[in-house]
C-alpha cells in the first residue's frame, strides 16, 4: 500500500523536514509540494539537504489536487481559513500549524487574540501527540501538530501528573531553552546573525501560546512557561519545576517515569551517573524523533526538576507528525523515524 | 595614594580579570602575582589579553610578601586553610572563593559537605555585593567574593523582596543559564569542546551551592535554583519566577525596581518595547561590570519573571571585587570599571 | 550473506561513527567492540547517540577473536605494531589510522618522524579513497583510512589534475578549515571550551602530515596545506588555490568536474547562483557521506579556487571506510550511507 | 583643545564603534549623530552598548551642521556623491566607506563596476592605514577608511615586501576568515541565524574588492584574496601564503617583522611555543585595536604562511579611523584605543 502525501507550505523548515522524512518512507509517495513563494522552483532551491532527491518542483496553491493525505505546514492562521477546501482534497489531514491544537474556541481566542475562523473543526481534530492521544490518532482523519515547547514540557511532566505525585497548591514553572529554527525560515531583524548569535534572550517570559497546549494536555491551570532563546539552531530543552508530595522518593519518580514511558518508542529516560551526557541534551537529538526525559529531586523541599530534550523540528513538529501519519495509516509507528542522532556534533 | 595589591591564584580566569582591571586602576600598583602552577613564568603565558603589560612574573606561594591588599582567587577550600597567614601579610583581603561567603558555619557545612576550617573568620568577612552590603564593605578589611549565579539571582529579585511584593507561600524558582568560563581555566572531560559546544546541560538541577548565598542575602528559604550550561563562554542570565501579591501592577514593579536601583552605578533596568535587546542579555556585557535587570508580569496569575544578566567573571566575580576594593580603599566606586561592553559581539 | 565486523578502538569518535553506520547495515553483524579504556562498560557510556542499540559491551584488546573484517580505529602508531596479530584474526582489515596510508616507507618516515614498524605491509594496503582507488579496493583485503583534510583537498583538486588544466610551474595552496572533533575524543588544554570556542587557530600553517597523502594521490609535489581550526565540531572545508592554463574557461572547469564525478555516488558539484548554499558547506553534511565540491575562476589571473566540504568523521573517516567495506564485500556501494544531512542545523 | 566630531551614518556597526571610542576620547566632543533611518530616536535604540551615555539623538542628514571633523560611516557610494557638501561642513573628513580608498579612478571603476562620482577627490584622500601612511595622514585633512580584509592581509605581508624577501614569480594567496558583522547591521536572507550559524561559506572565492587595496598598498599585482565566512561575529584572520627567496631562514623573518613593527603601537608579533594562543587569534582582540601578526616557514619549499588577526570593526574600521583622527589632530596616537581585549571570551 502506498499513501500519496502532498505537503502544503513545503518551503519552510517543518515542510523541509516532512519532505526529508517522507522521501525515505517506504509506504509514502510524495504527491505535490506547494509553496506560493517558490512555485515553479526546484526543491533544492530552499532545501539544500534534499539535493539529489527526485522531488517535484513547488506548485502554486491553486494547483493542489487530490491526495490521500495532506500535510499542512503553513503559517498560523492559514489552515483554519482554508480547511474546507483542504478537506475536499484529502480524507486525511495533518496540520502542523497552531490552528487546530486547542479544543475550545474560547481558549483559542484567549491565547491567539482573535476568534477562530472554523470553530466547528476544532473538535474534529485530535492533538497530535501520540504519547497522550495514540488511540484517538489511530481513529481519526484529522490531526493537529504540536507546539515544540509544549511537547517538551508535557513529556517532562506527564509521569508526575499521571501518577499524581505533585502537591496541587504549588505552581509548576517551565523554562524552555529554544533555538533559532523555531522562528522559521524567514529572516527578520531579530534573526540577524550578529544580533542572534550568542543571545540568551528572554523573548517570552510570560504569555507564550504553547502554555495553552500544556494546560490542556495536563489538565491543570497552575503551570507557567517562559521561553529563552539561546545559541542553538535546532533543539529545545524544557526544564520544569514542580513540587512533589511529602515523602516522595527518587524511587517513586523512577517508577512513575518508567511506567509512563516503558512502551513509548520515542521517549527515553536519560539519567546516568557518569559521562558528559548524564541528563537529556538536545544537540545529540538533531534529526531524531526521540524525546529524552529525566528528573531530579530535592528531597528537602520536594522540588522535582523534570527535563525533556527534543529536536524542535522533529519530535516538536515533523517527527511527531510522521508518527501520527504512521498511526493514522496503519504503518509501524517508527517507520521513517529510525535516525538516532549524531555524536559528537 | 597608591594601594599595593597582590593577586594570589593569579593564573585562573578570575585572577586574570583582576589583573586586567587593576592594571588600569590609577590608584593601584600590582605587587605580586602568585601561581603555584606557573611560578616563574610570565603572565602572558596564560593570559593572552595581558600581552604587552609590564606585570611581574608569577611567584611561588612561599614568596608572597606584604601588601596593602590581597586578592585571593584560589580554588575553594584553600583560603580558609591559609587565612591566618594571609591576614599577616595584608590588612585587607578580598577572597573570591566560596570560603567566606556564608555567615554560618552550619550553612557552610550543609552546602559544602564538610566543616569549615576557620569558622571564627566567617563573621569577620562581609559578603562582597555592594548592592546589599555597601556600608559594611566600606568599614571592613575582609570581603568575600560573590557567586556569579547568586549575584544574578539576588539582583533580579532584590526589589521584589525589598518592597514586599511577593506572596510568601509560593516558591521562587530561578533558572540560571551559564557559560563555560564558570568552570574555570582547567580542562576536563566535560569541557572538551566537542562535548561542551552547543550543550544545553542541566548540570545542577537541584542542590547548587549558590542557593545558600541567595537564601542568606534575601532572607528567605523557599527559593530554588537550577543551573543549565549553554553555548556561551562568558555570561550568566538568571530567570527568576516569583508570584506577586494580588493586585500588583506593572507600575508597582517599575517603582520597586527604580527605587532599589536608582542610585546603583552598575545596575540598569533594561526593558524596552523595540529593538533586539528589549530585555537584559549577557553577551553585550562581556567585560563590563553592569548587571542588567528586568521583569515581566503575568497579570492573571501574578507570576513575575525577573531576569538579570551579568558577565560572570565581572559583576559575578572580579568586577564586584574591584567595586568592593574601591569602597574599602576610598576610591570612587566605578574606578577601573568604566568599560561598557561591546556590540555587536 | 552477513559479514561479521569487529571494531578495534571503538570508543573514539571514528569508532563511534563506524558503530552507528554498521548498526544499520543490513549485511553486517557487529562482532566485538574493543576499547582498552572502557573495557567492560556499555557502549552508551561514551556514545550517547547509540543509546538503545543492542551492541555488546567493550572488550579488552586481548579478548579479540576472529571476525570476517576488522575495523581498526586506534591512535596512530598502534596498528603498525599489531598488524600481524590482526591479520591472523581477520582476512579483511580497514585501518582508519594514518599507519598505512602512504606507500613509501621513506615518505612515512619523513612526515611521521620515525621509521615505520611494518614497512612490508605498506604496499599491501590500498589507500581507502574510492574516488581514486575503487578498482583496487574491490580486489584487496587491506584498506587504509583517509586523512580528512587530505580527502577534502584531493576531491577539490582531482578534476583539475585528471584533465591537465593547471599550469605546472605555479604552486597549489590549500587552506583547510577544521572542526574540533578532528582532535579526537580526549580532552586537552587546547580543547577546553573557553579556549577552543570561537577560535580561528592557525594550528598547522605548514608541515601538516596530510600533505603527504595529497601529494601521493595527485602525483605532484608543489601542493601546500595549511590548517585552521574554527568554531565547528564536525566538518571540514578545503579551499584550494591553483592556476589554470591560459585560456581555460569556466565551461572547461564544468566539463572537468562533471567528467570526473558524474559516476561518483558521493561527490556532488554544488554551484548555484541563488540561495544561501551556493557553494559547498560542511554543516549541512553532518552525518552524511557526501563530498560537495565546487570551483571559481578568476579569468584574468587564471586562479581557480576549488572547494570541497565534507563531514570529517564521515567522508573523511568512517563513511569512506564503510564505502570501502561495501566495495570489498560486494555490497552496493551506498549501503548504510543513505543519510543525506540536515537543514537547518 | 577639544575637537568636535560628528558621525554621519551613526546607526551602523562601524558608526556604533566610532561612538563608543569617541565617547571616551578626552579630546573629542561628539557633535551630531546622523542616521536617516533612525532620525529622532535615541542612540540606545540601536546601540545597546551605549545605554547610559549622554549622546544626542540621531538627526536627519539635512540637519547636519559644521564640525571640526566629520566621520562618514555610510554605505559605499554615498560619500562620493556628497563629498562637496561634507567638505563645506568640516575641514577634516574621515570616510570609512570604500569610496576614497583607491588612488586611481580606473582601479575604482574596475573593482566597483562603475565610474567614480568624484574622481578629483581621489588624490586628495590618504589611505587610512597608519602603518603605511602615517606621515601623510598627519599632514592631510582627508583620510579614507580601510577594508578590514585588506588591513589584515597588508599587515601580514608588509614586512615580507619591505624587506624584499619574496620570490617575485610566485603568487601570493590570502585566505581571510570573516565574521558576520562584516556584512553590516541590516538583516538579509544570508544573515538569518539558522542559515549563517556554523557556516563555512566561500562567499568571495575570487574577485573581492579589497584585493585592489592590497595591490595598491603592497605595490604588486600577483596577490589573490579569498574570503570565507565562518562562525564568528567580530574578527578576521588573514592567512597569507607567499614564497620566500631560497635560503631565507626563520631568523630572517623574525628580523623583518621586528624591523617593520617595532615602533608600531598596535601591531604585535605573536609567536610562542606554548599555550593555547601561539599564533594570532581574532577572538581575544574583540574591542581592541591590535593587529596580531605571525609567520611560519616551510624551509623546504620556502612557503611562508603569514597570518594577521584583527577585530574587523576596530583595526579594520573604527579603530584605525580613531588612530588616524589622533594623528590628524595631534593627539597621542593611542588615545581612546587602550582597551586590550578580553580573555576568556
Image (cartoon, coloured by chain):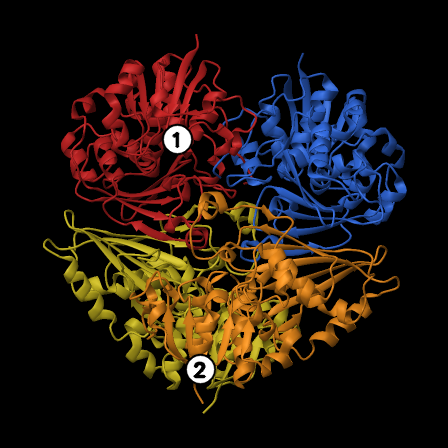
Chain colours: A blue, B orange, C red, D yellow
Q: What chain does badge 2 belong to?
A: B
- The residue depicted at 75 percent of the width and 40 percent of the height is A248
To which residue does mark 2 refer? B68
Q: Is the residue A72 above or below the residue B6 in the image? A: above
To which residue does mark 1 refer? C315
Give the distance between the C-alpha atoms of the residues marked 2 and 1, in whole angstroms: 61 Å
Q: What is the x, y in percent for residue A339?
A: 56, 27
Q: Do labels 2 and 1 share a chain?
A: no
Disc 2 element = loop
Q: Is the residue D84 above or below the residue C245 in the image? A: below
- The residue depicted at 74 percent of the width and 21 percent of the height is A328
Q: In which quarter of the image is the N terminus of chain C?
A: top left
CA neighbours of label 1 inside 10 A, class few (<14), some (14 to 19), many (20+):
many
* In the image: residue B244, left or right of residue C201: right
Q: What chain does badge 1 belong to?
A: C
Residue C223 or B309: which is nearer the viewer? B309
Amino acid at each position: 500500500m502506498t499513501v500519496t502525501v502532498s505537503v502544503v507550505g513545503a518551503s519552510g523548515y517543518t515542510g523541509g523536514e516532512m519532505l526529508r522524512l517522507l522521501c525515505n518512507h517506504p509506504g509514502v509517495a510524495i504527491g505535490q509540494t506547494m509553496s506560493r513563494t517558490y512555485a515553479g522552483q526546484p526543491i533544492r532551491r530552499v532545501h539544500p539537504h534534499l539535493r539529489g532527491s527526485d522531488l517535484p518542483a513547488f506548485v502554486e496553491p491553486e494547483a493542489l489536487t487530490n491526495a490521500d493525505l495532506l500535510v499542512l505546514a503553513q503559517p498560523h492562521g492559514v489552515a483554519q481559513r482554508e480547511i474546507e477546501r483542504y478537506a475536499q482534497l484529502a480524507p486525511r489531514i495533518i496540520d502542523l500549524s497552531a490552528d487546530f491544537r486547542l479544543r475550545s474556541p474560547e481558549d483559542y481566542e484567549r491565547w491567539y487574540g482573535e476568534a477562530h475562523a472554523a470553530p466547528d473543526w476544532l473538535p474534529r481534530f485530535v492533538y497530535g501527540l501520540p504519547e497522550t492521544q495514540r488511540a484517538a490518532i489511530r481513529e481519526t482523519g484529522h490531526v493537529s501538530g504540536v507546539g515544540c515547547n509544549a511537547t517538551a514540557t508535557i513529556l517532562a511532566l506527564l509521569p508526575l501528573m499521571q501518577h499524581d505525585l505533585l502537591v496541587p497548591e504549588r505552581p509548576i514553572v517551565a523554562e524552555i531553552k529554544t533555538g533559532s529554527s523555531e522562528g522559521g525560515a524567514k529572516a527578520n531583524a531579530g534573526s540577524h546573525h550578529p544580533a542572534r548569535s550568542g543571545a540568551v534572550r528572554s523573548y517570552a517570559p510570560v504569555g507564550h501560546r504553547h502554555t495553552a497546549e500544556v494546560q490542556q494536555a495536563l489538565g491543570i491551570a497552575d503551570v507557567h512557561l517562559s521561553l529563552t532563546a539561546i545559541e542553538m539552531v535546532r533543539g529545545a530543552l524544557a526544564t520544569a519545576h514542580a513540587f512533589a508530595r511529602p515523602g516522595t522518593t527518587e524511587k517513586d519518580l523512577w517508577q512513575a517515569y518508567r511506567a509512563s514511558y516503558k512502551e513509548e518508542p520515542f521517549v527515553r529516560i536519560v539519567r546516568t551517573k557518569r559521562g558528559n551526557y548524564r541528563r537529556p541534551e538536545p544537540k545529540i537529538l538533531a534529526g531524531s524523533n526521540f524525546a529524552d526525559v529525566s528528573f531530579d529531586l530535592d528531597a528537602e523541599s520536594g522540588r522535582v526538576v523534570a527535563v525533556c530534550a527534543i529536536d524542535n523540528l522533529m519530535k516538536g513538529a515533523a517527527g511527531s507528525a510522521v508518527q501520527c501519519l504512521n498511526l493514522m495509516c496503519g504503518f509501524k509507528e517508527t517507520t521513517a523515524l529510525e535516525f538516532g542522532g549524531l555524536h559528537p556534533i
